[in-house]
């Protein structure tokens, strides 16, 4: 079983405008809701890849109940404490002008020490069934910045491989430990480090993990491991929405690791999952048919 940890899930709201005028009244054409948060996207993608998946989160108020219900409908087991304050709402604007794909991200419920302790208890309880752990996304207010570091410490002691995708202080603290995999997009990487181009960025992260993935939109994936560096990409004529594509890519990498794929096969599945997210406008969701259709079209180059 793969355990996905998402402390800060959200209700992702896709709002369609013809165009958006700042400081003016704007009429919504269409509105859609999806279960969201980076880890939630990862869990949904893993389930679509037919991986047994458990999702650990703080489930806040009615929003949390709704997100949890959507996850359970797809067969994802959900664990973690219920909180009174609601989970956040995140907005994505879909327009025909410069505001297209503009994201407005909520902050999430305030987590107290009791909820935090229950979260760690649920984490420890599920460990005997866990093959791989994925940590993905931000921390809600009140959550200690070293939560991911503590989880990685426990996982290391239990010899459970762990992948991580986060930024800021939680990333800095967590990566004091060597982990199984790290994914960052190139913009996030540049906010934390200075290593030149995407290839060198992946090689730097490979000093902190067995698998190091840097993504950069249309430029694709740079995946480093054991002194091997691979560039994989796939050209799409039309992109409907890229929101959550990096999370779906991470799911592909994690599923590949569990299946003991080669590095090239891992890169192919990761990129196919990311591209599958882009061919539909659903936020953070993929369909296995698209992944299988796109997989043979991925271009893979061994750089070194």
Image: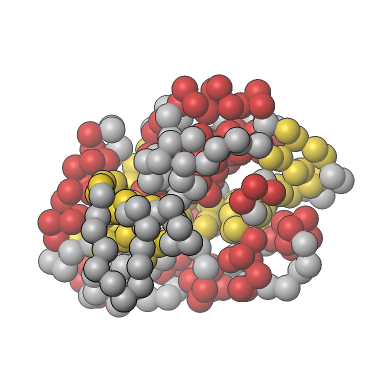
Q: Is residue 61 above or below residue 144?
A: above
For residue 162, side relative to residue 282 (left or right): right
Counting from the top left corner in percent of width and height, residue 216 is at 64, 54
Q: On the image, which quarter does residue 26 sit in?
A: bottom left
Residue 28 appears at what percent x and percent y? 24, 55
Picture residue at 37% right of the left edge, 41% below the top: 282
| Front-lying residue, 140 or 277 | 277
Q: Is residue 82 visible?
A: no
Is 86 in front, or is 132?
Answer: 86
Nearer-the-camera pick, 20 or 129 = 20
Please state the total of marks drawn on the protein image: 0
Depicted 85 relative to depicted 291: above or below: below
Name the spot of residue 271 as percent of width and height, x first.
61, 38
Specify the quadrant of the image occupied by residue 182: bottom right
Residue in the picture at 23% in, 41% down: 70
Q: Residue at x 66, y 27 (%)?
A: 297
116 sits to left or right of 202: left
Q: Residue 136 location, x and y as percent?
A: 45, 56
Q: Nearer the viewer, residue 277 or 265?
A: 277
**Does residue 184 appear in the picture of this structure?**
yes
User: Residue drawn at (28%, 33%), measured in percent from left and top?
Assistant: 74
């Amino acid at each position: 079983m793969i355990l996905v940890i998402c402390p800060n899930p959200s209700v992702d709201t896709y709002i369609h405008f013809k165009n958006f005028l700042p400081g003016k009244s704007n009429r919504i054409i269409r509105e859609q809701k999806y279960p969201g948060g980076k880890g939630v996207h990862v869990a949904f993608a893993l389930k679509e890849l037919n991986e047994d998946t458990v999702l650990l989160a703080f489930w806040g108020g009615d929003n949390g109940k709704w997100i949890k219900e959507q996850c359970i409908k797809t067969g994802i087991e959900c664990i973690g404490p219920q909180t009174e304050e609601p989970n956040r709402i995140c907005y994505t604007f879909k327009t025909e002008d410069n505001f297209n794909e503009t994201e407005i991200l909520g902050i999430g419920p305030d987590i107290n020490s009791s909820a935090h302790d229950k979260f760690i208890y649920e984490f420890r309880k599920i460990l005997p069934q866990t093959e791989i752990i994925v940590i993905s996304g931000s921390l809600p207010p009140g959550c200690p910045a070293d939560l991911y570091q503590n989880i990685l410490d426990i996982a290391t002691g239990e010899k459970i491989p762990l992948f991580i995708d986060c930024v800021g202080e939680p990333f800095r603290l967590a990566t004091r430990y060597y982990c199984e995999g790290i994914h960052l997009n190139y913009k996030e990487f540049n906010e934390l480090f200075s290593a030149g181009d995407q290839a060198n960025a992946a090689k730097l992260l490979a000093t902190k993990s067995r698998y190091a993935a840097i993504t950069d939109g249309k430029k694709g994936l740079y995946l480093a491991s054991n002194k091997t560096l691979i560039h994989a990409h796939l050209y799409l004529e039309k992109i409907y929405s890229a929101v959550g594509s990096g999370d779906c890519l991470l799911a592909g990498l994690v599923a590949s690791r569990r299946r003991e794929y080669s590095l090239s096969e891992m890169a192919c599945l990761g990129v196919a999952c990311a591209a599958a997210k882009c061919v539909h406008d659903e936020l953070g969701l993929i369909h296995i048919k698209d992944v299988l259709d796109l997989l043979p079209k991925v271009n893979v180059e061994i750089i070194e």
